Image: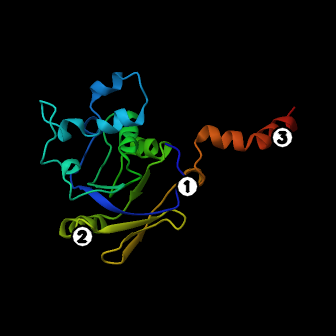
Amino acid sequence: MKQKFDIITSTCVPLPLENVDTDQIIPARFLKATTREEQFFGDNLFRDWRYQADGTPNPDFVLNNPKYSGCILVAGKNFGSGSSREHAAWAIAGYGFRVVISSFFADIHKNNELNNFVLPVQVSEDFLAELFQSIQKNPETQVKVDLPNQTVTNLSTGHSESFEINSYKKHCLINGLDDIDFLVQNQDKTIAWEQQRK
């Protein structure tokens, strides 16, 4: 979903597991889907952890715990490893997450998130551990993600860290543009460049 991105303040959903791969985010059987509907993929985010074999919700999985909510997912180190399926980013966006915070992202998955208007925020392992502790202590803990200033703040402690993002992707997120929108917006420049080289 194309949404302009500025500053987001939200409670968080904690997933303190390392090496969460794209098959766990969206199992391979859903890659056969003929739809691109966000709700379909969002409904099947973490499908095999979220639901039991009979299709009933797994009460032990965090997405089924009413204590936790919000549009920020806080995940363990090495999030999004495995295959390069873009469907994993579709599922995260389709569920309603706008930000994923981790101490390390697989490169392809990180770019897939950015292309689907989800902001991957990479923080230090110490900051991530503090976030998990704050959320465990108080599920109402809020985190502020400031894209223009590239900072993330744990509002329960006041601690902040800066994060890196490609300047082009930052521009696209802030303005709600995908790659095609960006090209259309700069069509005059493209035409002028081509005419100079005739």
Task: Tell me the quarter of the picture where residue 39 sits.
Answer: top left
Contact? badges 3 and 2 (CB < 8 Å): no
Residue 192's label in the rendered image is 3
The tag on residue 170 is 1
- Residue at 57 percent of width and 56 percent of height: 174
Q: How far is disc 3 from disc 2 in space, using C-alphas?
A: 53 Å
Mark 1 vs mark 2: in front: 2
* Left or right position of 45 against 166: left
Asked if residue 84 shows in the view, the reply is no
Neighbour tally class for label 2: few under 14, some 14-19, many 20 plus, Cα within 10 Å: some
- Residue denoted by label 2: 134
Amino acid bearing label 1: Lys
Which color mode does the image show?
rainbow
The numbered mark, 1 or 3, whose residue comes first in the sequence reads 1
Q: Type of residue at label 3?
A: Ala
Image-quadrant location for residue 145? bottom left
> Closer to us: mark 3 or mark 2?
2
Q: Residues within 10 Å of mark 1 (few under 14, many from 20)?
A: many
Q: Position of residue 38 (x, y in %)?
A: 41, 36
Q: Quadrant of the C terminus?
A: top right
N-term-proximal mark, 1 vs 2: 2
Q: Residue at x 53, y 61 (%)?
A: 6
Helix, strand or loop under label 1: helix
Q: Amino acid at mark 2?
A: Ser
